[in-house]
Image: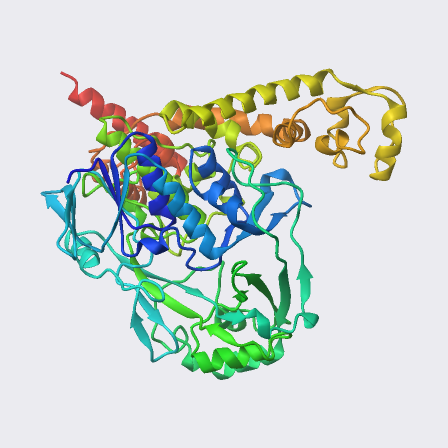
Amino acid sequence: MYYDVIVIGGGHAGTEAANAASRLGAHTLVVTSFLARVGQMSCNPAIGGVAKGTVAREVDAMGGLMGRAADRTTIHFRMLNRSKGPAVWAPRAQCDRGRYSREIRRLLEERRGLDLYQGTVASLRLEGDEVRGVVCSDGSTFDSERVILTAGTFLRGSIRIGSDRELAAGRAGDAPSVDLADQLRDLGLEARRFKTGTPPRVDGRTVDYSRLERQEGEEEGYRFSHWEDSGGLRRRPCWISRAGDEVKEIVQENLDLSALYGGSIASQGPRYCPSIEDKIVKFPDAAGHQVFLEPEGLETAELYVNGLSTSLPPDVQRRFLAAVPGLENARMTQAGYAIEYDYFPPLQLRRSLELKQVDGLYLAGQVNGTTGYEEAAGQGLVAGINAARASMGREPWIPARDEAYVGVLIDDLATRGVDEPYRLFTSRAEFRLLLRQDNALARLGPIAASLGLLGNDETRRLNDHLEELEGARAWVRQARVEPQSANEWLTKRGTSPLTEKQPLDRLARRPQVCLHELVADEGPLDDPGYGRDALAVVEMEIKYAGYIRREEERARVLADREHQPLPPDAPYAAFRSLSFEARQKLAAVKPETIGQAARIPGVSPSDLQNLLVEVRRRLVANEP
């Protein structure tokens, strides 16, 4: 059977890729090894966090699945970094693990033109360097000229628990994909190994909560999805403890039994999500390390022990768990483990996420050297859009760095590559005041509509939001605040009272003033009828107007250079006016534009100037 797009894998990248492709009208197939685990949260059952929460909102603004499923299954929500500027505000939701996966499948099955098949892809069908479909281990074959590989940690995946125990697995309970990994290597693709890991889980019924710090979620109405206002599920608290000296001693005594420090793992792991072994070896003087106990769902007592990722043997894990206050008698329900897997260095990709070496084959998610559900979802979205557009003979959509964090992610991968599992941070974005979580819909909704990703109801909701934004901006410019109505309210918030009537847009510049609170039940102003989302966007625009203008100007300057194309067959090795390092890096990356070339490490400003001269000289020489 022929499909416009075939997606291999049903994780966060695969489901977003399939959803995006089918929304664009491409007849799409998802092939995954176990349909009951579509959208599985293989590690922490949480969505969002610093930068990641903005990505989740961006994916949602483009018609994605993650935000809707997260909102429907939220059991604990917090807006991180509220004490800091809005560029780093970060929504994060703890979700019900089982229900999240079921919601993702429900959303997929609502899509017309999207089929699901349970099977393991054993190989790609190829004609020369062009993809023609897939062959499953059960003998099924499916034809397509556009295939998206989102295999996560399954390609030659290997679980390590202790220094002497190795299990062939893509994750606990699932077999790895070996034949497909070998075929990709045989095609001449460069493959390397990364590792990641997960902590033990414990039975919450055996935890002494009296020894833990209780952390409640926020109930202020924040959410991920722009398209529906789900209240989530019944809320549950998280709990905080600390791994102190006793845990440190147990880990130090058993380092030789760790898969990582015992020598059985040599691959690079994520720097920003270290194992407890890494923490104790690399930070020996630390007084302790925080441990977060996070609920797995409403229908289970199991808790995820965030902060104790490990590859030590199970008996050692039980010992250090018992040394954590509150977990003295806790029963471990699942041992933590490390996993090694193949990934393909992303310099082999175009920014459309299509492989340079194999036409029609796209890669998204951890196979590109990234880590995290949100990073995977963002790549899946872009790969799905571009595979579908290619099947229709259209040009790819490449998100810019000043348009979305997803654009930062894609450009970093294809331009700079990775030497450790890639994770998004606000510091990676040079335009982070433009890329806030509150304005994701205003930024990307019109793009999604123009691409054809939104349905009629979503388009109407987008237009209503944009109209509401304009109305809220006009109201803030025109409104005046009387001292007698506002001074008591201002004094309670620690800011000076007014001495005369003041324009609202000037008052809103104060750090202590929140537009939403001004018109809330106890606020001094009459409610003009604008929603919280619109007021949040307008407030950030007012408070940071000068900084935002500067970033917008920088973005315009970058755009002028960004869109100067470079020939795909440029003979960089022959450009002797460039440094040797620049020639090497340019030949490896094959940048599509001058802007992309400028971001390649090792390419200096003088190299860029000389590159422009060399390209012009070559174009003149080739003129008839």
Q: Nearer the viewer, residue 174 or 514?
A: 174
3 relative to 457, above or below: below
Identify the image quadrant of residue 89: top right
Q: Position of residue 78 (x, y in %)?
A: 62, 49
Rendered residue at 60%/19% (across/down): 470
Q: Position of residue 36 (x, y in %)?
A: 35, 55
143 relative to 532, above or below: below
Rendered residue at 85%/28% (across/down): 486
Instruction: Pick the quarter of the image with the N terminus.
Output: top left
Is residue 117 rendered to the left or right of residue 129?
A: right
215 relative to 206, above or below: above
Identify the image quadrant of residue 258: bottom left
Q: Nearer the viewer, residue 319 or 51?
A: 319
Is residue 203 rendered to the left or right of residue 513?
A: left
Rendered residue at 55%/29% (across/down): 551
Instruction: Pick the quarter of the image with the C terminus.
Output: top left
Q: Position of residue 326 (x, y in %)?
A: 64, 74
Q: Nearer the viewer, residue 226 or 576?
A: 226
**Residue 361 appears in the picture as rendered:** yes
Q: Position of residue 617 (x, y in %)?
A: 24, 24
List the single residue furthest toward the left. Answer: 127
**Residue 602 appears in the picture as rendered:** no
Q: Nearer the viewer, residue 439 or 330?
A: 330
